[in-house]
Image (tube, rainbow, N blue to C red):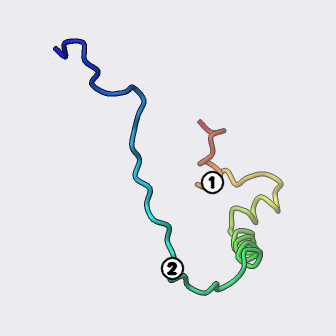
Amino acid sequence: MNKGKVIAITGKRVFYRASPYRGPYHAEDQDYSESAGKLFRYLYQAPYIQYWEKHGKPDPDSRNAQAGPWNG
């Protein structure tokens, strides 16, 4: 086979490191807190969230309520 000669060192690997991205970056439309606020306002208006708030439990007919790991 290799007649006892070393073929390669075990565990030695070469990785390619991509050069960092230097732009151009676009200007921010809004900061993170504004973005999070918009998200929460949008989600709060969702019918399944409104049902949960009104009835104190998830809507059993909502696909969103059925999508969790607790429903197998």
Residue labelled with disc 1: 61
Q: Is residue 47 left or right of residue 18?
A: right
SS of the residue at dot 2?
loop
Residue labelled with disc 2: 23
Residue type highlighted by circle 1:
Asp
Pointer 1 local density, CA inside 10 Å: few below 14, some 14–19, many at least 20: few
Residue visible at 64% across and 86% down in the picture: 29
Q: Nearer the viewer, residue 51 or 11?
A: 11
Q: Is residue 62 above or below residue 33?
A: above
Residue visible at 55% across and 85% down in the picture: 26
Report the residue that reaches farthest toward the left: 1
Q: Is residue 63 left or right of residue 17?
A: right
For the residues bearing labels 1 and 2, Cβ distance under 8 angstroms: no
* Location of the N terminus (image quadrant): top left
SS of the residue at dot 1?
loop
Could you tell me residue 67's position as x and y percent? 59, 48
Q: Which mark is residue 5?
A: none
Pointer 2 local density, CA inside 10 Å: few below 14, some 14–19, many at least 20: few
Quarter-of-image position of residue 42:
bottom right
Quarter-of-image position of residue 5:
top left
Number of marks drawn: 2
Q: Is residue 47 left or right of residue 24?
A: right
Quarter-of-image position of residue 52:
bottom right
Q: Nearer the viewer, residue 51 or 35?
A: 35
Marks 1 and 2, the one that precedes in the sequence: 2
Residue visible at 31% across and 27% down in the picture: 8
Residue visible at 70% across and 76% down in the picture: 35
